[in-house]
Image (cartoon, rainbow, N blue to C red):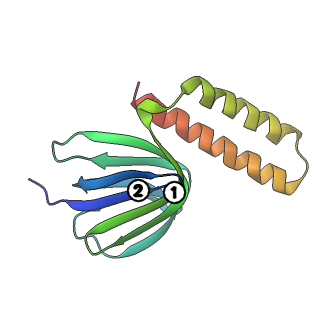
Amino acid sequence: MAASFRLIVVTPEKVFFDGETTQIIVRTTEGDIGIMANHTSLVASLPSGPLKIKQDNGEWHVAAVSTGLLKVGGNKVSILANAVEWGEDIDIERAKRSEEDARRRLSEEQDRHALDRAELKLKRALNRLSVGSYGK
């Protein structure tokens, strides 16, 4: 049996996950990384991307993270995220509508701040669609 570590995933609204796991794979701004027990200390920024959590029984659970921070140290991983949802809980139709709205805004907007918001919305929608396909 692989060694485990504590994973805590928190959003502004709730503690999304608090438990033991044997491995995670998460997207950072520098690329995807895998973390196992006793990983070296690390702090990283998280864009919208998938979070894969491996349980003791070998099953993987996938969630969509919408930007945040990752902290690794002391055989504990903390993720502070703006939003997180399990793949199987994602409303695919809503995510598609969000993608369409973001693409429309990108084609219409001229203001840099509005364009940046639309780009973030598009990235979040695409991540939700991608992760949502794992759970369906």
**Left-right relation of 126 to 33:** right
Q: Is residue 75 above or below residue 134?
A: below
**Left-right relation of 105 to 14:** right
Quadrant of residue 79 within the rendered picture: bottom left
N-terminal of the pair, mark 2 or mark 1, is 2
Quadrant of residue 57 within the rendered picture: top left
Residue drawn 52% across the image and 52% down it:
13
- SS at badge 2: strand
Give neighbour class at mark 1: few <14, some 14-19, many 20+ (Cα, 10 Å). Answer: many
Q: Position of residue 124 (x, y in %)?
A: 60, 44
Residue 34 seen in the current view: no
Q: Position of residue 9 (x, y in %)?
A: 41, 56
Q: Position of residue 43 (x, y in %)?
A: 44, 72
Alpha carbon separation for disc pair 2 and 1 = 7 Å
Labelled disc at residue 16: none
Quadrant of residue 73 within the rendered picture: bottom left
Q: Is residue 97 above or below residue 52?
A: above
Q: Position of residue 121 (x, y in %)?
A: 68, 44
Instruction: Name which residue type carries label 2.
Output: Val
Q: Is residue 117 above or below residue 31?
A: above
Residue 41 seen in the current view: yes
Instruction: Name which residue type carries label 1.
Output: Ala
Residue drawn 45% across the image and 31% down it:
89
Badge 2 vs badge 1, beta-carbon distance below 8 Å: yes
Labelled disc at residue 81: 1
> Quadrant of the image for the C terminus?
top left
Count of numbered badges drawn on the protein: 2
Labelled disc at residue 9: 2
Give neighbour class at mark 2: few <14, some 14-19, many 20+ (Cα, 10 Å). Answer: many
Q: Residue furthest front?
A: 13
Residue drawn 91% across the image and 48% down it:
110
